[in-house]
Amino acid sequence: MKLIGLYRYVYNVVVSLCLKCKNKGQEMYYNTTNETGVQLKANLEKANNQTHLTLAVFQTYPNDYLSAQEVWTFLMDNESIEEHTPLTSIRRAITDLTNKEKLVKTDKKVVGSAGRRTYTWRLK
């Protein structure tokens, strides 16, 4: 039984590494739940869509400094993302876009939904 679990784990690691190599330079979905097959493909597509939508918000407001919460709210208000889309998905998209040098993290902070100060980003 433990051997089957080990094989499954190794398989998931290999698939994850292959996807990272295949998608190098593209938006990423961090497969932390070790999804495979159809579910993994759906998650990758959803993550790519969230990243494109996030970039579109910054392109719509090229001179504004936006927090992840503000981007999430904008996308929710426009019904561009599903109601249950977590804020962390938008944060992941912002991180990916920052790593690809499409966005720049600023020193400016705003008060987020939890009452804590949070950073903003702007279009590069």
Image (spheres, rainbow, N blue to C red):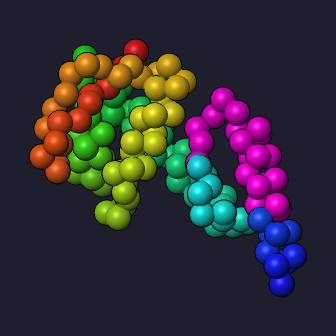
In the drawing, does residue 118 fall left or right of residue 95? left
In percent of width and height, residue 112 lies at: 18, 43
Q: Look at the picture and state if 20 lies above or below 59.
A: below
Residue drawn where x is 46% and y is 40% of the image = 93
In percent of width and height, residue 100 lies at: 54, 24
Q: Can residue 59 be seen in this view?
A: yes
In the drawing, does residue 35 fall left or right of residue 95? right
Please state the total of marks drawn on the protein image. Answer: 0
Taken as a whole, is the magenta stretch helix, strand or loop?
helix
Residue drawn where x is 59% and y is 42% of the image = 28
Instruction: Work out whether residue 89 or residue 77 is closer to the camera in this orientation and state it.
Output: 89
Is 90 part of what is drawn in magenta? no
Point out the image quarter for the C terminus: top left
Point out the image quarter for the N terminus: bottom right
Q: Look at the picture and state if 119 lies above or below 74.
A: above
Q: Can residue 74 be seen in this view?
A: no
Instruction: Work out whether residue 1 or residue 122 is closer to the camera in this orientation and state it.
Output: 1
- Report the magenta residues as a range: 10-29
In the drawing, does residue 62 fall left or right of residue 13? left
Residue drawn where x is 55% and y is 44% of the image = 48
Residue drawn where x is 42% and y is 35% of the image = 94
In percent of width and height, residue 50 lies at: 45, 46
Q: Look at the picture and state if 107 lies above or below 78.
A: above
Q: Look at the picture and state if 119 lies above or below 29.
A: above
